[in-house]
Amino acid sequence: MSEATGSASEEPRRDESDGLLDTHSPRKIVAWATVGGLAVLLAAGALFPDSLAGTLSDVITSRNTLASALRLSVPIAFAALGGIFAEKSGVINIGLEGLLIISAFTAVYVTDVTGGVWLGFGGGIIASTLLAALFAVVTIRFRADQIIAGLAVWLIALGLAPFASQVIYGGPNTSTVPTIGAISVPVLSEIPFFGALFSASPSVYLLFLAVALSWYVFERTSFGRWIRASGENPKALDTAGVNVAHVRYAAVLLSGVLSGMGGAALSLDLGQFTGNGPTMVNGKGFIAIVAYLFGNYNPIGAFLSTMLFAGLDAMQTALQLQGIGVPRQLIRITPFVIVIVILALVGRTRTPEAAGEYYESGEE
């Protein structure tokens, strides 16, 4: 039995390690090219401070840029971690956007009713987890198509949250509630640039903890090996005596918990839920899917991918205020264009072998 489990769980780990350690892998090449490009840009900015390179260098090295990148990365990175748990177990959860929406609204509503910010944070997590549980039952128990079910989760939340806000608050936007606030570490928060790491919302520190714990679960625990085996070779896991359905239920529920933390942090950091158009979530759940694919299903890689996109987004916001002679519309789409180019250079990410496939215990 142990041999069956080992063969199912070690294969994906070997593939991931090869991709991360191979110095000629597309990800390594893109990473080194990015570092080299940044070094050249910073050097040019130091030599010619009044040039465009100087302006870009100032924006990149600004403490405000790092602070904005951390804030923008929180909902995306939490959802990306949740997506990793679900998809590595064999369940493709593209409803992350919906989980973020429902948790963002519920967090504000519960905070408004109870007056407790952390009670609202917990309420957002519960709402997201319940919606994820519904998705899990439909896809695992009743064998519904995972892509269609994920889209249904998104559309349900996209309609339900603004509707509930309209009923309760008389409009798609809720009233304002107290925010989570920030934690500042004396002395360390005054450090140039990196001081932003020591003066941030508690949700940022929760994200750091979640990334570390997620990596530990996958690399150092039996549960993490079960998740990998469930997505790669569920029959081997079943032969080893582990219930595949239970592992997948647990993984999908974890995706709900983590996405709930991201959605609650998004709205409570601002103190309001806005439900106009695509809502305040505005595609962050779909960006999370791109982040964990680019990060090769690795929690640390997904976080770094999220920081790349969030950093580009923070930079374009700052550049719009600089008046560098480039139309704002062009600056606004720059992060998306760069991400598409990087994804094209990196190439295809290997998805788990059994992702999207239904498995019933005892199947031949």
Image: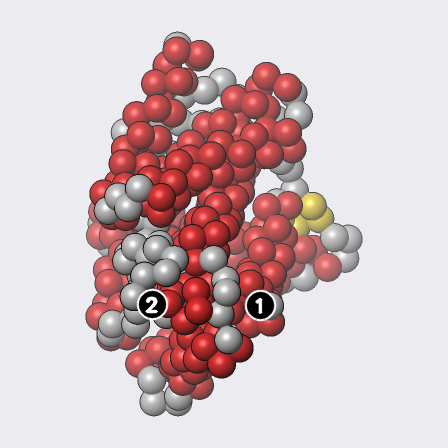
Q: Earlier in the sequence, mark 1 or mark 2?
A: 1
User: Residue 5 in the image: x percent, y percent?
Assistant: 48, 74
* Secondary element at image label 1: helix
The residue at 42%/32% (across/down) is 102
Quadrant of the frame with the C terminus: bottom left
Q: Nearer the viewer, residue 9 or 304?
A: 9
Name the residue type under label 1. Ser
Image side of residue 354 versus residue 198, left or right: left
Question: Which of the 4 image quadrants contains residue 32?
Answer: bottom left
Q: Which mark is residue 314?
A: none
Image side of residue 336 versus residue 295, left or right: left
The residue at 37%/14% (across/down) is 166
* Secondary element at image label 2: loop
The residue at 45%/20% (across/down) is 174
The residue at 32%/36% (across/down) is 153
Residue holding disc 1: 222
Q: Nearer the viewer, residue 228 or 127?
A: 228
On screen, residue 78 above or below 18: above
Residue holding disc 2: 352
On screen, residue 344 above or below 74: below
Name the residue type under label 2. Pro
Q: Nearer the viewer, residue 67 or 21?
A: 21
Q: CA distance from mark 1 to mark 2?
A: 18 Å
Tell me, yes or no, if residue 199 can be seen here. Answer: yes
Tell me, yes or no, if residue 150 can be seen here. Answer: no
Q: Nearer the viewer, mark 1 or mark 2?
A: 1
User: Residue 216 in the image: x percent, y percent?
Assistant: 59, 67
On screen, residue 346 above or below 231: below
